[in-house]
């Protein structure tokens, strides 16, 4: 049972435009959500997180939106840059100790120059 | 500060063999988690160790095991390898257990089972 779903395997956008990456989850008890970026031959790197008590968190060009009623979160990248081309993973879990991360399968973002 | 290191980076084994992968966390980090990444399943949590104790475990068979040493270095072992065990195995370290502590990933060990 895939508790965190990234239904679109890939996304292609023009440099300078907005990239919107979507993620859905099924476990309504999840209260902490994260996005990771992964380049080939490297491990994932943390991008941004959001707690369930918030509906938006912003860090530079990256903004994560959380819609708890829809069990949906999205990552917005504005403006998109060619260096943003990577695989993006959505992950969810519980903020307490001894919690494990449940990851989606990832979305491959390509930003065209 | 050195990042998370994993050895070896690449490994080829045959079915039925066993394998041991190693992870050295960032200095000062006491929590180490292991993940398996495959094209079909994405990243799946294997287990987490904190202060030499397994804190959490994912849904993997008992062939997958791990341990953590007093210096926080961790190893994972897979016995009786199967073709389906071919994957990228990622290790991540954090200061403490709990998701609010940022996890830093190593580059992974690419295991191929023939």
Image (cartoon, rainbow, N blue to C red):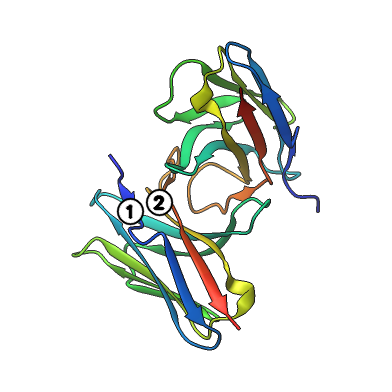
Compute the Cα span from label 1 to label 2. 5 Å
Q: Judge from the rendering whether residue B18 lies leftward or rightward of residue A100; answer left or right.
A: right
> As displayed, is residue A5 above or below residue B83?
below
Instruction: Look at the picture and state if A25 lies above or below B75.
Output: below
Q: Position of residue B23 (x, y in %)?
A: 70, 34
Any mark on residue B111, and which? Answer: none
Q: Chain of mark 2?
A: A
Against B33, is B80 above or below? Answer: above
* Spot occupied by residue A17 in the image (x, y as percentages of width and height): 48, 87
Q: Are marks 1 and 2 in contact (CB under 8 Å)?
A: yes
Quadrant where the C terminus of chain A sits is bottom right
| Residue bearing the label numbered 1 | A5
Work out whether residue A38 can be spotted: yes
For label 2, the residue is A104
Q: Are marks 1 and 2 on the same chain?
A: yes
Q: Nearer the viewer, residue B23 or A107?
A: A107
Which residue is at 61% across, 22% downward? B114
């Amino acid at each position: 049972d895939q508790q965190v779903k990234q239904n679109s395997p890939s996304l292609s956008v023009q440099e300078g435009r907005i990239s919107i990456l979507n993620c859905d989850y099924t476990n309504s008890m999840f209260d902490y959500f994260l996005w990771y970026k992964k380049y080939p031959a490297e491990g994932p790197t943390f991008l941004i997180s959001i707690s369930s008590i918030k509906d938006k968190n912003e860090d530079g060009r990256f903004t994560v939106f959380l819609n708890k009623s829809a069990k949906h979160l999205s990552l917005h990248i504005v403006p998109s840059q060619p260096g943003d081309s990577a695989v993006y993973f959505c992950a969810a879990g519980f903020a307490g100790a001894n919690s494990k991360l449940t990851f989606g399968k990832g979305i491959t973002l390509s930003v065209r120059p | 500060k050195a990042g998370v290191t994993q050895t070896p980076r690449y490994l080829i084994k045959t079915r039925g063999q066993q394998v041991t992968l190693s992870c050295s966390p960032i200095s000062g980090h006491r929590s180490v988690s292991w993940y398996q990444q495959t094209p079909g399943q994405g990243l799946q949590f294997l287990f987490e160790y904190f202060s030499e104790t397994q804190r959490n475990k994912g849904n993997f068979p008992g062939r997958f095991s791990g341990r953590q040493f007093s210096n926080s270095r961790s190893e994972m072992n897979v016995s009786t390898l199967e073709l389906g065990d071919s994957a990228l195995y990622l290790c991540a370290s954090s200061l403490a257990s709990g998701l609010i502590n940022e996890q830093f990933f190593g580059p992974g060990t690419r295991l191929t089972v023939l």
